[in-house]
Amino acid sequence: MATCRECDDEVETLVTLKVGGKARKVCEDCADRLREQAEIAEESESVVQNMMGFKGRR
């Protein structure tokens, strides 16, 4: 059995996910949660940039 690096639970399969430029092997539940967090962070950054009138690229 493999162990998830995020929640330390033993799972049958691990998913490789890039977070912050690093590849992490996590279970599917943690991968979904990390994807949602990254999506929310990206959206909130976009809102702040629009509010401040930022026209550049990221």
Image (cartoon, rainbow, N blue to C red):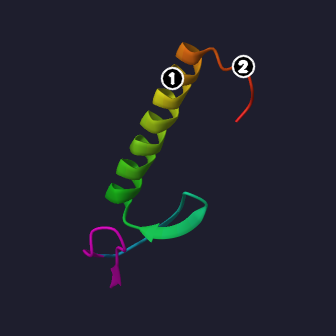
The N terminus lies in which quarter of the figure? bottom left
Q: Is residue 19 left or right of residue 32?
A: right
Q: Quadrant of the C terminus?
A: top right
Percent x, y for residue 31? 41, 56
Could you tell me which secondary element the residue under label 2 belongs to?
loop
Query: What range of the chain is rendered magenta?
Result: 1-10
Relative horizontal placement of residue 11, taking residue 54 as reference (left or right):
left
User: Cβ–Cβ below 8 Å for labels 2 and 1?
Assistant: no
Q: Residue at coordinates 34% horizontally, 73% vertically from top-left?
A: 4
Majority secondary structure of the magenta segment?
loop
Q: Secondary structure at mark 1?
A: helix
Say if 28 sits above or below 45 in the image. below
Which one is nearer the viewer's eye here, 3 or 38? 38
Nearer to us in this view, 23 or 13: 23
Amino acid marked by disc 2: Lys
Q: Which residue is mark 2?
A: 55
> Mark number for residue 48?
1
Q: Residue furthest front?
A: 52
Image position, residue 38 (x, y; %):
47, 44
Describe residue 57's horizontal placement relative to residue 54 as left or right. right
Q: CA distance from mark 2 to mark 1?
A: 12 Å
- As displayed, is residue 12 above or below residue 1? above
